[in-house]
Amino acid sequence: MLTVADIMTPNVTTIASGATVAEAIYLMQHRQIRALLVEHRDQDMPFGMVTERDIVYTVVARGHDPAKVLVQDIMRQPCISLDPGLTVQEASQMLSDTGVQRAPVVQDGELLGVISVTDILMRGMPALSLSH
């Protein structure tokens, strides 16, 4: 049975909570990604997440200047984190229950990767053969 560790994306792009949204946009465009994990300021704090949707809905749509808005002001925190040993079904259930599309994979306080609903669909499901 596949686990979160089997299908997660190990290379995670992070950003500081005090960075500007303009910096976040640059990183997302440069790396062609849709979300950034927001670094926690200390081990006791959870990670945050900022997505393209957060930026478009709370900054762009409201006419705010991305160079003047901080990531910490629009990020989702706390975001849930998942254990690498969870099965794909367990991870899917947790994402479904919380309504989030992606979550950091953390073990013993160490960031190992990130898992998204796209990872589950593209790598966690067996290929289906459709014959007509």
Image: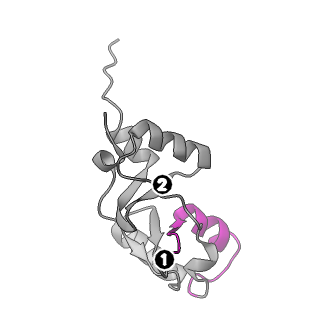
Numbered badge on residue 102: 2
Residue nearest the viewer, comparing 60 with 123: 123
Numbered badge on residue 65: none
Crowd band around label 2 with a 10 angstrom C-alpha radius: few (<14), some (14–19), many (20+): many
Mark 1 residue type: His
Q: Quadrant of residue 125?
A: top left
Query: Residue 4 at what x, y percent from top left?
Result: 36, 47
For residue 10: magenta?
no
Circle 1 sits on which residue?
Answer: 40
Q: Which residues are magenta?
A: 44-67
Query: Residue 118 at what x, y percent from top left?
Result: 42, 46
Query: Residue 12 at what x, y percent from top left?
Result: 35, 66
Mark 2 residue type: Arg
SS type, badge 1:
loop
Residue at (37, 70) in percent of width and height: 13
For residue 45: magenta?
yes
Residue nearest the viewer, comparing 71 with 40: 40
Q: How is the image coloured?
A: one colour
